[in-house]
Amino acid sequence: MTLSAAMALAAPAPAGAEDTEPAVVPNGTFSSPTVPADKTWASGVEGWTSAGGVTGAPRSAHPRGFQSAYLPSPSSTPLSTRLPGIRKGATVTLSWDDNPDTCVSQGAAKRTYTLTVAGGNNTQGSFSTNDPVGKANWYLGRTYSFTAAEDAPKITFASTVSDNLTCGPLIANVAAKQTAPPLTAPTGGASSDPCSGDAKDNAQCKDLAADKDKIEKCPATDRNCLAGVAGDGKAEKDGIAKETQAVDAFGKVPRDQDPNTAASDLCALPNALTAGAKPGDAVVPPSDWWFC
């Protein structure tokens, strides 16, 4: 195997099921900042730390029209970000596309770079682009899998080119999928018990402990024994009886009424408001306004 072929291999993926749940990559298509129409690149990459910047869609010439991030020279600050929403222990698969920038002349060496992820068990991935041909020559669908060693793990792309240092690889369309770790029960043990520690000696906790001891000694079939501890439920039964009586009384309330009688009951207020109005005070006499 040639050296360049070996560098195209990513770190081995950790064992486990395929990662299928989408995860957020900040500005993964490098659409911000937007490169002005009269420019070929812009400095800075929103959501990422980098001494580089982004190239506009015409210069990137990505098959899907994306802008791309260019990796600065190896001595500069590399391209890095964190992946929010990913918890420690998740397995993650990153995917992206790479390309030798058009500033690299045809026949020059492939543009090489690494991908580093936080965590001692995550082997650094080494990659190289397709051959420079004086125009776009994208490789679509690079992948790298890892296990998150921290919440919101940090990922870093860094150029390793050894010639024409300012003309490194382009990265585009960075995406991530994950398999989240199982949720764990809250820790705390005895401290989560309100009657643990010194609290066990207060009156309520003592009564609770005594009742628990009595119930544990009662056979499940002995109703009299259980009633002696838990009570006979008289208060609960009385409450249910009162509720039943109230519902029954509510159901007996008559709800049918003659419409004219109901309307008459509503007339008191408007009649009081218009009682002082004289025949010439309104074009339409108040007595003709409605039923009243």
Image: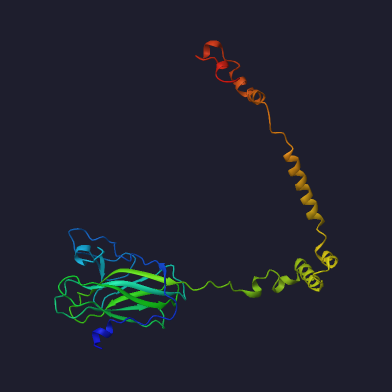
Give the side of residue 163 with respect to residue 8, left or right. Answer: left
Residue 27 percent coordinates (x, y):
33, 64
Q: Residue furthest top?
A: 280
Give the side of residue 81 with respect to residue 192, left or right. Answer: left
Residue at 60% x, 22% y is 270
Residue 283 vertical placement versus 56 (above, below): above
- Visual colour scheme: rainbow
Residue at 14% x, 76% y is 106
Residue 192 percent coordinates (x, y):
64, 71
- Asked where in the image residue 204 lies, by quadrant, the reply is bottom right
Could you tell me which quadrant the C terminus lies in? top right
Give the side of residue 144 with respect to residue 211, left or right. Answer: left
Could you tell me which quadrant the N terminus lies in? bottom left
- Asked where in the image residue 65 lies, by quadrant, the reply is bottom left
Callout count: 0
Residue placed most toward the observer, 157 or 181: 181
Give the side of residue 97 with respect to residue 194, left or right. Answer: left
Residue at 27% x, 83% y is 7
Residue 279 percent coordinates (x, y):
55, 11
Residue 249 percent coordinates (x, y):
76, 40
- Asked where in the image residue 218 lies, by quadrant, the reply is bottom right
Residue 244 vertical placement versus 229 (above, below): above
